[in-house]
């Protein structure tokens, strides 16, 4: 009797264990199926938004006037065209501002953007000690006004050899080469060019850098104008006009030209040639946008891309994917 009761108790315990195991397994399977469904929905949403972002890059590549990016390009009509899927696309030029990672301290001092009690030298020293920053708030927020970080400066952009801070250029070389001595030789060459007031053109960049230097630094370091005249904010233009002593008439002619329509390279060259000190603006003001932010939304879902146009010797448009953020 005792042996039978003991056996019955063992069987009951085993059944309870198996029941708990089965119920737990069923719950796990149900949870897995639910998560799988969410993953599929997330993947479907991502695919829809990605397709819209890719179409925008395609429109940028098919620009019939590749020498200039302007509000008249077909990409804007494509973005604003009515859609039946609830997707919206936003395209923003994020590089046509002054790069806080590369701006020279004498130009920075004339922006009026430094917080009281701080000097441009501190920004230069911070770049030397802490390196370059993609997040400007965490890097420079204690030195520069918050509004200016949004309206005047940008972390996106290439390094134009004629206008980037010489110590930043040295740091870029050192980072890419791992050779401090070679970076210092490059720094001295840049210094000598600036003392001689030499402006290095895109055609001269290869000979200036040398074959090895060009292969090492291009396209990160180039001689392409950093800002697009069509999209650069007025406040940034005002800084440049003030620093380089551009007359009111010269400033007005540049402003009128960009408001009148798409400026051609010939138009821009004539404007700069006809403006006193206009040559000083040539390394800053061009007609191409180098970094774009593409934001695609559908309901509460959001996909953000940063894409970069790569400087090329032949001018052929080429874009590279830089960043992605997806909110399902």
Image (tube, rainbow, N blue to C red):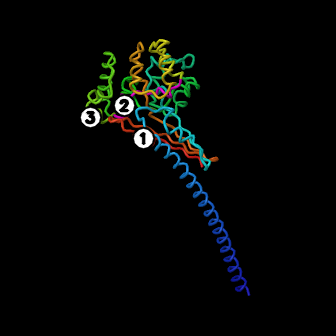
Q: How far apart are marks 2 and 1 (CA)?
A: 17 Å
| Number of residues whose C-alpha sits closer than 10 Å to that of mark 2, classed few (under 14), some (14–19) or many (20 or more) | many
Q: Which mark is residue 148?
A: none
Q: Which of marks 1 and 3 is in front?
A: 1
Q: Which of 243 and 36 is in front in this view?
A: 243
Answer whether residue 285 is magenta in the image: no
Q: Is mark 1 on a helix, strand or loop?
A: strand
Q: Which residue is drawn at 26% across and 30% down?
A: 210
N-terminal of the two: label 3 or label 2? 3
Question: Secondary structure beneath disc 2?
Answer: strand
Residue 27 location, x and y as percent? 66, 66
Distance of label 3 from label 2 (alpha carbons): 13 Å
Q: Which of marks 1 and 3 is nearer the N terminus?
A: 3
Res. 221 mark: 2
Residue in the foreground of this view, choosing between 48 and 58: 58
- Where are the magenta residues, as a range? 218-233
Q: Quick one: 245 or 1, which is closer to the camera? A: 245
Quadrant into which the N terminus falls? bottom right
Q: What secondary structure characterizes most of the magenta part?
A: loop
- Which residue position is annotated with label 3? 212
Which residue is drawn at the image coordinates 30% and 33% (left, top)? 214
Q: Mark 1 points at which residue?
A: 319
- Cα distance between the residues tagged 1 and 3: 24 Å
């Amino acid at each position: 009797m005792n042996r039978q009761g003991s056996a019955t108790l063992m069987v009951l315990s085993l059944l309870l264990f198996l029941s708990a195991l089965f119920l737990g397994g069923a719950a796990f399977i149900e949870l897995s199926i639910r998560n799988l469904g969410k993953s599929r929905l997330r993947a479907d949403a991502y695919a829809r938004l990605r397709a819209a972002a890719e179409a925008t890059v395609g429109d940028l590549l098919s620009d019939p006037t590749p020498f200039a990016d302007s509000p008249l390009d077909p990409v804007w009509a494509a973005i604003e065209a009515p859609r039946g899927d609830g997707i919206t696309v936003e395209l923003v030029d994020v590089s046509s501002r002054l790069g806080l990672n590369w701006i020279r301290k004498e130009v920075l001092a004339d922006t009026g953007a430094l917080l009281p009690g701080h000097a441009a030298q501190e920004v230069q020293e911070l770049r030397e000690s802490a390196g370059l920053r993609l997040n400007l708030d965490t890097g420079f927020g204690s030195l520069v006004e918050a509004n200016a970080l949004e309206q005047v400066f940008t972390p996106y952009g290439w390094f134009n050899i004629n206008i980037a801070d010489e110590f930043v250029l040295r740091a870029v070389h050192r980072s890419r080469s791992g050779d401090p001595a070679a970076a210092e030789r490059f720094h001295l060459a840049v210094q000598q060019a600036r003392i001689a007031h030499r402006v290095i053109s895109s055609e001269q960049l290869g000979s200036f850098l040398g074959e090895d230097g060009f292969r090492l630094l291009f396209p990160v370091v180039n001689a392409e104008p950093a800002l697009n005249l069509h999209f650069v904010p007025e406040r940034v233009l005002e800084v440049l006009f003030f620093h380089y002593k551009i007359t009111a008439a010269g400033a007005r002619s540049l402003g009128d030209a960009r408001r009148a329509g798409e400026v051609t390279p010939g138009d821009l060259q004539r404007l700069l040639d006809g403006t006193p000190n206009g040559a000083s603006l040539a390394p800053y003001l061009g007609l191409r946008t180098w970094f774009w932010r593409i934001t695609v939304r559908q309901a509460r879902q959001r996909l953000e891309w940063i894409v970069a146009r790569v400087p090329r010797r032949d001018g052929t448009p080429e874009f590279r994917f830089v960043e992605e953020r997806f909110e399902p």
